[in-house]
Amino acid sequence: MASCMSKRNLLLIVVLFWSMISALGVPEAKVKTWVIGGGIPWAQYSSLMISMDDTTNPGALQPREFDPNVNIIQTLGKKHYFRVPRNDPLFIKGEGMRCWLGTNGADGESKWLIDADPTTKHGTLTGGSPARYWVTLDTGFPVYADRFVFYPPQEGVDPFGRPFKEDYMRGYELSASVAEPDFIPMEGTGAADPYHLLPNLLKRVFSNFDSIVEVDFPLQKLRFLRLRSTANIGFLIAEMELYGKGFAPKALFRSKVIDLGRPVNFGKVKWWATKLRQERIWQPIDGRWNLVGGDPQPVPVSDAPVSITVKTMSGSDETPFIYHKINDMLEEVEVTESEYKRLYAPPSHPDRPVLPGQRGSVTRDIENWSLWSEPMNGKITSPGPRRFFRFEIILESDSPWTFVRIDSLSFEYSSVLAKEVIGEVAVLDDPVPSEGIAVVVAGEPVTFTYDIRTEFDAAHQGGYDAIRIVVPRHTVFEELKMGTPLGSVSPKNVSLSAGNLDIYLPHKITQAKNEPIRLIFTTQVTNYITRFIGEVFDTQSGDLPQSITPGNATDNVSTNKLTVLASEASLQGILSTLDISPRCITPNNDSHSETVEISYTILQAETAHVDITIYDISGMQVRKLVSEEEPAGQHNKQWDGKDDVGALVPPGIYICNLLVETNKGVTRKTKTLTVVY
Ligand SMILES: [Ca+2]
Ligand SMILES: [Ca+2]
């Protein structure tokens, strides 16, 4: 019955859209709409929900409200028992929950502290040094909490014949933070005493007499909690519990891979949402928290401090990941997702051997899938034409009593204009640059070629008659060339506004009349990475534009990229050198070319703030290597080919960006390097 209703609502929305589109005067309803919500349960399209609630308002999505009677730890999804959860290649820091002992949690014993079973336990009753025992909880997404509880088993006796409930922690300190402090990733990597208090000390008790310890503190947003014993007396912990109130400050919905049946181009994303406020008053009555007042219903508030972030990724096959297994030769071989899920997880502890038949790495399929887009408002920026897409929604709020509810979300798509439109950019005078990528002087006019090749594989692909390139300011269009061999032709029209260079072709590119195209324009590059994003469109059909894919558009140009770099020569001043060696690394544990050595010299300043970041070729940050004050002189740093969460990066070209900031100004230097396996 419920599902009949849902389908009818979906139909209603689709019909509504189609009538809206026709009302706008588009000749045919060529733009279709994929809708979620509005009566359709969100859960059926979900691959992951964190702190999200899709049941309180059926058909809508809103952040979970914390119930002061419910232990938050048991609501956060998959638990990880290590600071670095090597046994879960899909773990994402700041998303998945972690709880670990000491610096990393040698054997994952923290499991017993949060398994919701008050008889299983861990502690330092025999051996060990209680004062060196501490446990850290990372909720992944932040929560609003005001109470932390921990206790030993309340039943049974210990090996010395004492009731377990006497084995409570005799002194403790509890500290918290919202962001991950810089020292956490470094703990256990050399310091004699790696323990640090988190920035916000919630409570310190040197003489505790309670078996069940209940720490109350003002309701606050937090993500990290750290509990340490301050007394040198053995103890046990059976369970740790965290309680709060209000609506989750951050909530995630991530969709499954959605199959549109055939490759499409993407249009706009739209959503229907309401900003709400609902303050609640809770009071403990007979050991249980009860609602005693506040707003009975959520009230719409137009200026509630809330935000919605929507991102997409698009792909040409059914999964954005590549799964691997360890074979008998201890090599990684590709397997299907379902086969991967049947394999044993690898050991978390770095000293334990990797064995044949275990799960290997899971890497991103960068050949068939785009990365997550930047947050979108309006146009879907993931590339088409693609048959599959995924999306994620993050709802955030700066107050425990406000939230935003999404009723429905829609994505536009339409038929492709061509099988593929491929582009590549080079400097006019340097079509085969030695770096494999165009490198130019920043801030000076440079003339570029932008070659486009089109592939068709079906007659219904209608083609296009116009091209749009996103360009920096101070761009001058020079020339349009078409045909084989390329010959100068007059465009029907050229317009340049708001960073868009639009060129209207003298005739339409179709399967029957398909010609290579070269645009020539002069512009000034001002960033160290510039991406000449482009799309083609048809002024007649009403179909959506199609992205230009970077690739081999012509054999006369060797870059096969739409990306341009600014050279070191265009930078000046504080640095004298930036050297990277080797420029190509193979981080595969064969003790050969495992790391890149990055050396640089700071001159003309006593100290400088140095920031070294590795980017991939699309400009996404891969690894923050250094961010610190450094004295003048020569410095050496190493990059091991790993990203910010410790996973090896996919093979490809990477960009090392060095930024040095002193009282004399900011200097950037950039070099490329290659990772191969
Ligand atoms: Ca337990
Ligand atoms: Ca080429």
Image: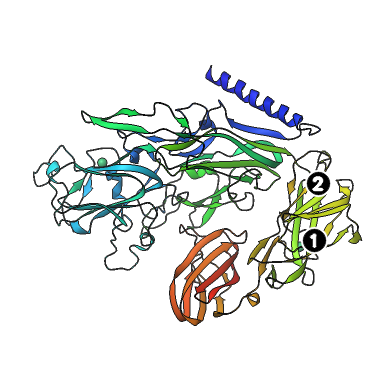
Measured from the top left, where is residue 219 in percent x and y?
32, 43
507 with respect to 174 (left or right): right
366 with respect to 53 (left or right): right
Tag 1: residue type?
Thr
Do the numbered discs 2 and 1 sit on residues whose CB atoms are within 8 Å? no
Alpha carbons under labels 2 and 1: distance apart: 16 Å
**Residue at x 76% of width, y 32% of height:** 24
Closest to the observer, 279 or 312:
279
Residue of label 2: 456
Closest to the observer, 267 or 46:
267
**Residue at x 36% of width, y 42% of height:** 144
Asked if residue 485 can be seen in this view, the reply is no
Location of the C terminus by quadrant is bottom right
455 with respect to 285 (left or right): right
Q: Are there few (<14), some (14-19), or many (20+) residues within 10 Å of tag 2? A: some
| Helix, strand or loop for disc 2 | loop
Residue of label 1: 554
Closest to the observer, 368 or 132:
132
Q: How is the image coloured?
A: rainbow
Measured from the top left, where is residue 112 in percent x and y?
27, 44
Mark linked to residue 418: none
Q: Residue furthest left?
A: 161
Measured from the top left, where is residue 505 in percent x and y?
86, 51
Looking at the picture, does residue 534 appear above or below residue 673? Answer: above
Q: Residue 474 sits in which quadrant? A: bottom right
**Residue at x 51% of width, y 30% of height:** 60
Q: Closer to the N terminus: mark 2 or mark 1?
A: 2
Q: Would the CB of label 1 be found within 8 Å of ligand 2?
A: yes
**Residue at x 60% of width, y 78% of height:** 572
Q: Residue 117 sits in which quadrant? A: top left
